[in-house]
Amino acid sequence: MEYDVERSTQNQLVIFTREKNKFHFIANCVTQHTKTEQKKTKMTRTEKNLDEQYKPYLIKLMSFKDGVNYASDREFTNEELAQITPETIVRWMCVKAYGIPDPGPNDNPTEGRSSALAFAKKAISYFMPKKLMSWNALANPPVGNPTKSIAVNNIIKLVKKKEVRRQGKPSQATKPFTEEEYEFAIRKMDSCGDEQVRLFVSSICRLQMAMIGRIDDTSKLLSENLKENQQHSSYSILCKLCWSKNVNDERDAPDQILLGAQNASYCVLMALGTWLEYFISRGHMTNTNFAFGIDGQTDPVVIKEKASNHERNFK
């Protein structure tokens, strides 16, 4: 199947399929907005910021250190945080990994993984008053960031070595989709009786596959980031994902080429075209800047939750 992409006088991206010299309209996707037409994207809900992600780890550490069950909203002073030592962190991490604060050489970390300890280290470091300073054990008194001490790094390395030797907690990581599993899920999505759900979830899933992205990334795709590929406009379009966790600079999010496929399960242009046709015909495009703003949704967190919940039902 071949595709033709044209831009109308209203600065819109028009996608057609070419089949036996006949053109079939698929979608009319607004890709750019003038300054007067652009709307400020409002987020009625927000994803957890770093404070919210990391605070529970600090609460648990301080509760362990002081023997007090602190409330989740407890704020600690710099003086209290300065009392945290590498030894305290190591004993707390041992409880997380071994189940006891002082494990012996024959004990194995069957309660937690090294990756969990590494994340806990990062979370605690976030709140340290001198988090940019390495731990100086020779100073009197010792000073710096206790999470950057040799002792803390060594306990994480030890747990990782135990995992390699199959003496630690088994990995909980899920294996990636196989080709058969992906195609089975797509077939189930395409057979859904609810037209909106069918077009929405199958399109966002195919785009996620084509862009090798996460559901977080595709949920935040802006309509203006779907553009005409002027060099190869007959069979491709351009797409840019700006919200990936690895994107920290504009150069990290270049335009990427989206190509069609003869296998319908993998044809992202077909899926995007049918979804956008439905999306625009219902007038949702006027209410949101997000390409997958189902029901005119302007909050990417809600879009992600809807997509995740639907995808989970089809697996």
Image: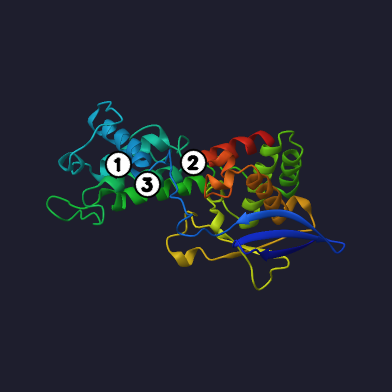
Can residue 253 be seen here?
A: yes
Q: Is the residue marked by circle 3 packed among few (<14), some (14-19), or many (20+) residues within 10 Å? A: some
Residue in the picture at 30% in, 53% down:
150
Q: Is the residue marked by circle 2 packed among few (<14), some (14-19), or many (20+) residues within 10 Å? A: some
Residue farthest right in this picture: 20
* Lateral position of residue 306 relative to residue 66, left or right: right
Residue at mark 1 to residue at mark 2: CA–CA distance: 34 Å
Can residue 171 be seen here?
A: no
Question: Which quadrant is the N terminus positioned in?
Answer: bottom right
Residue farthest top in this picture: 69
Residue in the picture at 64% in, 71% down:
230
Residue in the picture at 73% in, 68% down:
234
Q: Quadrant of residue 282?
A: top right
Residue at mark 2 to residue at mark 3: CA–CA distance: 36 Å
Q: Is the residue marked by circle 1 packed among few (<14), some (14-19), or many (20+) residues within 10 Å? A: many
Residue farthest bottom in this picture: 231
Q: Amino acid at mark 1?
A: Ile
Mark 1 or mark 2: which comes first in sequence? 1
In this rendering, the label closer to the viewer, 1 or 3: 1
Mark 1 or mark 3: which comes first in sequence? 1
In this rendering, the label closer to the viewer, 1 or 2: 2
Residue bearing the label numbered 2: 301
Residue bearing the label numbered 1: 89
Q: Amino acid at mark 3?
A: Ile
The circle drawn on residue 165 is none
Residue in the picture at 64% in, 68% down:
229
Residue bearing the label numbered 3: 155
Q: Position of residue 273 (x, y in %)?
A: 69, 53
Q: Position of residue 261 (x, y in %)?
A: 76, 59
Badge 3 element = helix
Question: Which quadrant is the C terminus positioned in?
Answer: top right
Badge 1 element = helix
